[in-house]
Image (tube, rainbow, N blue to C red):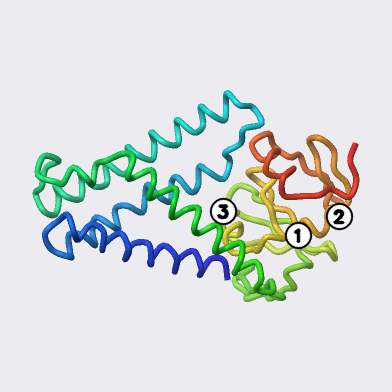
Amino acid sequence: MRKYFNIGYWLVVVLLMSLIFSSVVDGYSKALLLAVMFLPGALLAKYLMRDLSFTNRRKGILHCICLAVSTLLTEYLCIIFTSWYLFKLYPGNLPDLIFNPVLIWILLAAFIALERIIEYYLIKTVPPDEYITFISERKKVSVRTDSILLVESRDSEVLIRMADQTAYRTKMKISQWESVLDDRFIRVHRSYLINVNHIEHTTASQVTVGSFTIEVSRKYRDTFRRSVQPPQNC
């Protein structure tokens, strides 16, 4: 459900942006293309903001600066390359409004914030999927979503470990699993997604899910602490 909401939301954003750009460029086709080129920077900002934390204020501020600069450069490069390649337009021939950094940051922040608000109040109210279907060793498998303990990435394959101690091998990347699984699952390591309903024990740097004790990597610790209310603490 979350996956389809995100796709639909950003399609609507593209249409809204095309209407904005149509007032400053000639022709709706150009405006629509510029709106599509707005997406890479928006999705990059959305991805980088997930790990934004001010637990360490200095690092948090540095992260914000890097996020703002990288997003702005991505937007500029996409707009300039597309305009030149398809329309033979150079920056000097494009409206200054398109290159206004404040406008770009405001639009990005507004669209990302709106997505989170809608997702929180609407998607959260939808009952989670009871079953999930995927391909394991060339066979279609359907399992109860809540019976999944964790998702483990191992080089070229991913293991879906179940509460009954069975495991399924898939070729689907862990980042893809992160996008299709609901909020019962959180990332605690670049190689692990865990089901919070099966957490049995936590420490400052580890979490036990079923019979598996997993290190919570430094990158995900702040998110983990905010997302989970551990049953035990040491």
The amino acid beneath tag 1 is Arg
Choose top left, top right, bottom left or bottom right for residue 180: bottom right
- Decide which of tag 1 and tag 3 comes sooner along the chain: 1
Choose top left, top right, bottom left or bottom right for residue 12: bottom left
The amino acid beneath tag 3 is Ser
Checking the image for residue 56, the label placed there is none
Measured along the vertical axis of the image, is residue 2 above or below residue 70? below
Horizontal relation, residue 44 to residue 158: left or right: left
Q: Residues within 10 Å of mark 3 (few under 14, many from 20)?
A: some
- Decide which of tag 2 and tag 1 comes sooner along the chain: 1
Residue 28: percent from left, percent from top: 17, 65
Q: Are marks 3 and 2 in contact (CB under 8 Å)?
A: no
Dot 2: element = loop
Q: Residues within 10 Å of mark 1 (few under 14, many from 20)?
A: many
Pick whichever, 210 or 205, lies toward us: 205
Which residue has dot 2 on it?
A: 210
Residue 224: percent from left, percent from top: 72, 44
Which corner quadrant holds the N terminus?
bottom right
Residue 128: percent from left, percent from top: 69, 71
Which residue has dot 1 on it?
A: 161
Residue sitting at x 81%, y 44% = 207
What's the distance in space between the residues labelled 1 and 3, CA to CA? 16 Å
Pick whichever, 233 or 191, lies toward us: 233
Q: Are marks 2 and 1 in contact (CB under 8 Å)?
A: yes
Measured along the vertical axis of the image, is residue 77 above or below residue 169? above
Dot 3: element = helix
Checking the image for residue 175, the label placed there is 3
What's the distance in space between the residues labelled 3 and 2, CA to CA? 22 Å
